[in-house]
Amino acid sequence: MGQVTDLSAFHSLLTPEGQDLLAALRDYDPAQELAVASRLRREHPAELVTAALAQARLRQRAAAKFGAQDAYRMYFTPHGVEQSTRATVGAYRAGRLRALGVRSVADLCSGIGGDALALARAGIRVLAVDRDPLTAEAARANAEALGLADLIEVRCADVTDIDTGPYEAVFVDPARRGGRGRIFDPEAYSPPLSWAVEAARSAPHAALKIAPGIPHETVPQEAEAEWISDGGDVKEAVLWFGTAPGARRATLLPSGASLTGRGLPDPQVHKVGRYLYEPDGAVIRAHLVAEVAEELDGGLVDETIAYITADELRPTPYAAAYEITDELPFNLKKLKALLREREIGTLTVKKRGSAVEPEELRRKMKLKGRNATTVFLTRVAGAPTMLLGHPAGAAG
């Protein structure tokens, strides 16, 4: 009965009255929801007002992923906003498939249609499949709202019942969240990763979206594994079939810089030099720190820490560079005295291999002054260490 009620409420949003209500709520302040709801219920059915307010909140959340122009025309479920691919990542993936010559894709576990929309915008015909009726309705409404319905067929079905034979590629985005939160075991995905891999093997090309923390040893030998970050945040890993078997790749958006592994041995540990490089998270997840270290003619500060040190400043899209001014044994009392002496009022705290919480550290330092610095809490050759510096090229 609950599902029928949800579908009825959703369909009411698609009516002219529902559309007018959503338009009026575009810029509403959620803090004023009680007053807004009371006012609107005097003019509209209570069920419609409740559904419209819920949708308005979801659209506001979704704007960060889809951009305001699309998000405020789209329809979401709470789970759909949470699980959806960021539009920039979806567009990148769709572009790779298009470059492979793919013209049709079976998008399995399509959710509210974020990936299907990106594929259609790349000129690819899509079958979008989801087993939840409300989610499938949202995907269908999104295809209509963005003018892509001619390229997207939405089907409410179990993905295991779908014949993917007529399609040139398969895309699978298994559910990685359950009733207790995030799922870390790939075989506990819905559907399991093993099923998705078999579905991928049945098509000329395939892409499987997985959690970026997947152990490398679980990646099938015939798959290319790509880790993707956007704006410095690692968003996902993708297993590609029909591309470069065994390859490991890190791709950084929005620049599109892409680094492929060359099977290099682990970098040597070097004495801390003038510069410290913080590799992008996608580089670290893809185990490509050695490739970046070679490019920078650098080494690690510690064999277990993904910070690269070098004596020269070299531009690279794969790591952020900092000029190091101080190397000190870990001692919060000494750090506090040094920050006070240098009139540091703004402190950026970065850490690897340290249990200290950045917010707690900033609170203890009682910062005051007009200057800024960055402190790295880490290990150098096994010893707890504090490295102070600033972004390369910035004033100290």
Image (cartoon, rainbow, N blue to C red):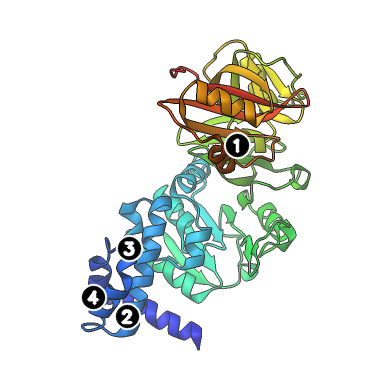
Asked which secondary structure carries label 1, the reply is helix
Q: Position of residue 135 (x, y in %)?
A: 48, 70
Q: What amino acid type should be assigned to the residue bearing mark 2?
A: Leu
What label does residue 331 carry, if any?
Answer: none
Residue position for label 3: 145
Asked which secondary structure carries label 4, the reply is helix
Looking at the rendered image, the disc whose residue lies closer to the viewer, 3 or 4, is 4
Upstream in sequence: badge 3 or badge 1: 3
Foreground pick, 3 / 34: 34
Between the C-alphas of marks 1 and 2, the distance is 43 Å
Q: Please indicate whether residue 227 sits to the left or right of residue 393 in the image.
A: right
Residue position for label 2: 48
Q: Position of residue 335 (x, y in %)?
A: 60, 27
**Mark 3 surroundings within 10 Å by alpha-carbon count, few (fewer than 14), some (14 through 19), many (20 or more):** some
Between the C-alphas of marks 1 and 4, the distance is 46 Å
Residue position for label 4: 16
Q: Are marks 3 and 1 in contact (CB under 8 Å)?
A: no
Upstream in sequence: badge 3 or badge 4: 4
Question: Residue placed at 48% from the left, 67% from the top?
Answer: 78
Question: Residue placed at 23% from the left, 75% from the top?
Answer: 16
Foreground pick, 186 / 284: 284
Between the C-alphas of marks 3 and 2, the distance is 19 Å
The residue furthest top is: 312
Q: Position of residue 154 (x, y in %)?
A: 47, 67
Q: What amino acid type should be assigned to the residue bearing mark 1?
A: Gly
Asked which secondary structure carries label 2, the reply is helix
Residue position for label 1: 281
Q: Please indicate whether residue 75 sits to the left or right of residue 164 in the image.
A: left
